[in-house]
Image: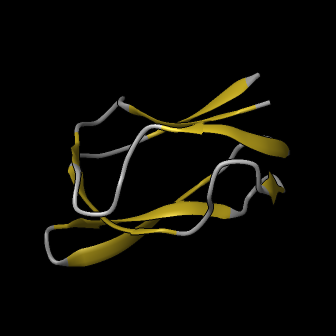
Amino acid sequence: MSEVIANMAGNVWKVVVKEGDSIDSGQDVVILESMKMEIPIAAEASGSIKELKVNEGDFVNEGDVIAVIE
């Protein structure tokens, strides 16, 4: 099991995957908007999305868990 972690604070601009989707390492999970820039947050492991912990429009802090991959 692996977690996708926010590497900076920002608003979730777009959620690219949904629960149950298969995902490859390096594939974008969400796009954050921070300081008027769009920052993709990618998975560091392959697997399937077990749980999404954010929705579009949510604010996340650095270190928050965005998704769980199994």
Q: Is residue 14 above or below residue 21?
A: below
x, y percent for residue 41:
51, 57
x, y percent for residue 3:
61, 30
Residue that protrudes farthest toward the top in the picture:
1
Q: Is residue 44 above or below residue 18?
A: above
Q: Is residue 44 left or right of residue 51?
A: right
Residue located at (35% from left, 54% from top): 55
**Residue 17 picture quarter:** bottom right
Colour approach in the figure: secondary structure
Q: Is residue 44 left or right of residue 18?
A: right
Specify the quadrant that holds the C terminus: top right
Residue located at (14% from left, 68% from top): 35
Q: Is residue 70 left or right of residue 19?
A: right
* Depth check, front residue: 58 or 42: 58
* Depth check, front residue: 25 or 19: 19
* Depth check, front residue: 47 or 9: 47
Number of numbered tags placed on the structure image? 0
x, y percent for residue 69:
72, 35
Residue located at (80% from left, 56% from top): 23
**Residue 32 picture quarter:** bottom left
x, y percent for residue 65:
44, 31
Q: Is residue 7 above or below residue 3?
A: below
Specify the quadrant that holds the N terminus: top right
Residue located at (23% from left, 52% from top): 58
